[in-house]
Image (cartoon, helix red, strand yellow):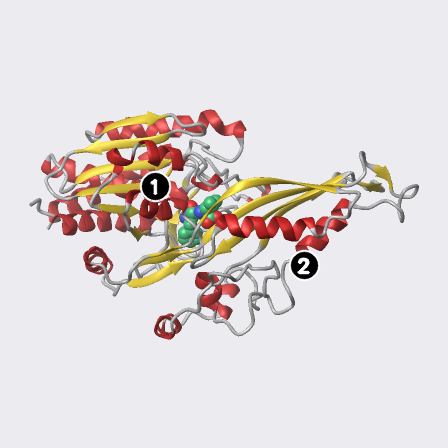
């Protein structure tokens, strides 16, 4: 057994060092979805390997067909844990909306809290470093870790994890552990810790509609020639009815009703649409009528257009009928909805709306099923007590509307349920300009992992 209090004290004593290390990592623009940043993704992986080595991990950059995966191993007496985080980040656009450069991290005061500003500060570099700092402190104080620890840091989480399935397949024996720990989720609020037991899945698909074989003069051809932007717009508009129900045939197959006791628990948490939407300048939920806010964001599926491209968007004006238009569309999935079944139904829905003299091409951008974990496993009980000790508040068992593909894969491929503990907050602006991570999340997050590792070892 390793005494916990000197470890917590060591974390407090090395706060500046920890912050500087996180800043170094944030400075590397590891945007995974855009090939322009490929070398930086590798640089982030190499930075992590070098940092893990200073703690005594046997770590390496492992090549995949896409961005590399970082794997590190460290011996320990207790049970074995596999910790997951991702070092890749989302693109920064619209870049002009950043108050300070996205890859020049700095401390700022926002809403009375000190925050670390920068792309990836919350999603997920700050989060993954909370765990690394906890390990560093154990090592410094005791010369060892309380558990046998393997870390896996992915470089493609934000772009649909295309390489992770073959990677897990090839390395299953090496990665299998007693517990999987994932730090990529949120707290309930800035004071209240949370464990996530549910995530939505995802189906991502791009459609490219081609009409004429070139861009046309909209006066000469207008009124006769099909406009692919109108075709795309009609497809997008047809996705939902006015009550927010999604109209892709078969879409709701496998969507279950949330049990009344769970709904009652969620209602007891008291999150209102006014407060939730008010924080981003909105008021009225747009999802299915008659559903509560948490149901809409945690337990109901969506169909959203994430991007739409076509026609003349430069300065001034051009009277053109474009030859092509495209849209990036994704569905958040719940319960037993299968990404590939939904993709096939979506494609059919799209084909039915493309005129006979036009064509559509599909680009599969990946997908992941939803995950639901038991609320009452012994390991969650330990993590819950450790979090409550650190934060001085009862830990809330929550779900997340976002997706973390690895969690389902750990379940399906390694037979491991994940303990999802994260210190992000609803106002972190992840995926948006001016992303931040609360300094308090970073500091107490590291202390929380120290407590959790110690509890798992006990
Ligand atoms: N950290 C998020 C998941 C998340 C979102 C947790 C909101 C808590 C609140 C994760 O890194 C993420 O953004 N995942 C992507 C996955 C996708 C690109 C496959 C997502 O949900 O869009």
Where, by quadrant of the figure, is residue 117 drawn?
Answer: top left
Left-right relation of 293 to 235: left
Residue 238 image label = 2
* Residue 382 drawn at (x, y percent): 18, 57
Dot 1 beta carbon under 8 Å from ligand 1? no
Instruction: Name the residue nearer the viewer: 24 or 360.
Output: 360
Element type where label 2 sits in the image: helix
Q: Residues within 10 Å of mark 1 (few under 14, many from 20)?
A: many
Where, by quadrant of the figure, is residue 387 drawn?
Answer: bottom left
Residue 361 image label = none
Q: Residue furthest right?
A: 220
Instruction: Name the residue nearer the viewer: 193 or 184.
Output: 184
* Residue 237 drawn at (x, y percent): 68, 58
| Above or below, 20 relative to 266 | above
Q: CA distance from mark 2 to mark 1?
A: 37 Å
Instruction: Name the residue nearer the viewer: 102 or 75.
Output: 75
Left-right relation of 409 to 250: left
Q: Residues within 10 Å of mark 2 (few under 14, many from 20)?
A: some
Dot 1 corresponds to which residue? 85
* Residue 404 drawn at (x, y percent): 40, 47
Indicate which disc, 2 or 1, sits on the residue closer to the N terminus: 1
Is there CB contact under 8 Å for labels 2 and 1? no
* Residue 125 drawn at (x, y percent): 37, 40
Whether residue 76 is visible, yes or no, is yes
Left-right relation of 149 to 29: left
Q: Residue furthest left?
A: 1
The quadrant of the image that shows the N terminus is top left
Left-right relation of 445 to 95: left
Which numbered disc, 2 or 1, marks the residue closer to the eye?
A: 2
Element type where label 1 sits in the image: strand
Q: Residue at x 28, y 38 (%)?
A: 18
| Above or below, 240 relative to 405 | below
């Amino acid at each position: 057994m390793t005494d916990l209090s000197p470890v917590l004290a060591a974390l407090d004593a090395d706060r500046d060092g920890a912050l500087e290390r996180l800043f170094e990592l944030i400075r590397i623009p590891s945007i995974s979805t855009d090939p322009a940043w490929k070398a930086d993704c590798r640089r982030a992986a190499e930075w992590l390997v070098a940092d893990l080595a200073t703690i005594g991990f046997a770590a390496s950059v492992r090549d995949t067909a896409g961005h590399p995966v970082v794997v590190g191993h460290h011996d320990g007496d207790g049970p074995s844990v596999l910790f997951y985080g991702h070092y890749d980040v989302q693109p920064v656009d619209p870049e002009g909306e950043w108050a300070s450069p996205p890859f020049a991290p700095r401390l700022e005061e926002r809403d009375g809290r000190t925050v670390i500003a920068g792309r990836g500060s919350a999603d997920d570099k700050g989060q993954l470093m909370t765990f690394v700092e906890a390990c560093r402190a154990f090592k410094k104080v005791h010369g060892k870790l309380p558990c046998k620890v393997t870390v896996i840091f992915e470089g493609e989480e934000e772009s649909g994890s295309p390489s992770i399935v073959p990677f897990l397949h090839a390395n299953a024996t090496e990665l299998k552990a007693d517990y999987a720990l994932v730090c990529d989720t949120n707290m309930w609020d800035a004071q209240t810790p949370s464990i996530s037991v549910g995530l939505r899945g995802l189906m991502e698909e791009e459609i490219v509609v081609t009409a004429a074989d070139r861009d046309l003069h909209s006066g000469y051809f207008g009124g006769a020639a099909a406009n692919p932007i109108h075709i795309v717009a009609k497809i997008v508009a047809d996705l939902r009815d006015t009550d927010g129900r999604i109209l892709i045939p078969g879409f709701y197959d496998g969507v279950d009703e949330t049990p009344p006791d769970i709904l009652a628990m969620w209602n007891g948490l008291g999150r209102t649409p006014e407060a939730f939407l008010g924080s981003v300048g909105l008021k009225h939920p747009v999802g299915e009528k008659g559903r509560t806010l948490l149901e809409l964001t945690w337990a109901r599926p969506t169909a959203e257009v994430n991007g739409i491209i076509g026609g003349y968007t430069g300065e001034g004006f051009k009277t053109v009928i474009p030859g092509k238009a495209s849209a990036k569309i994704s569905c958040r999935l719940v319960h037993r909805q299968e990404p590939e079944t939904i993709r096939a139904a979506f494609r059919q829905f799209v084909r039915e709306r493309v005129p006979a003299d036009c064509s559509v091409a599909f680009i599969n951008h990946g997908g992941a099923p939803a995950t639901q974990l038991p609320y009452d496993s012994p390991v969650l009980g330990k993590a819950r007590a450790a979090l409550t000790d650190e934060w001085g508040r009862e830990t809330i068992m929550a779900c997340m509307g976002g997706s973390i593909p690895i969690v389902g894969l750990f379940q399906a491929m390694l037979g491991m349920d994940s303990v999802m503990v994260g210190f992000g907050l609803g106002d972190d602006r992840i995926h948006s300009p001016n992303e931040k991570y609360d300094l308090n999340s970073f500091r107490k997050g590291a202390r929380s992992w120290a407590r959790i590792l110690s509890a798992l070892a006990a």
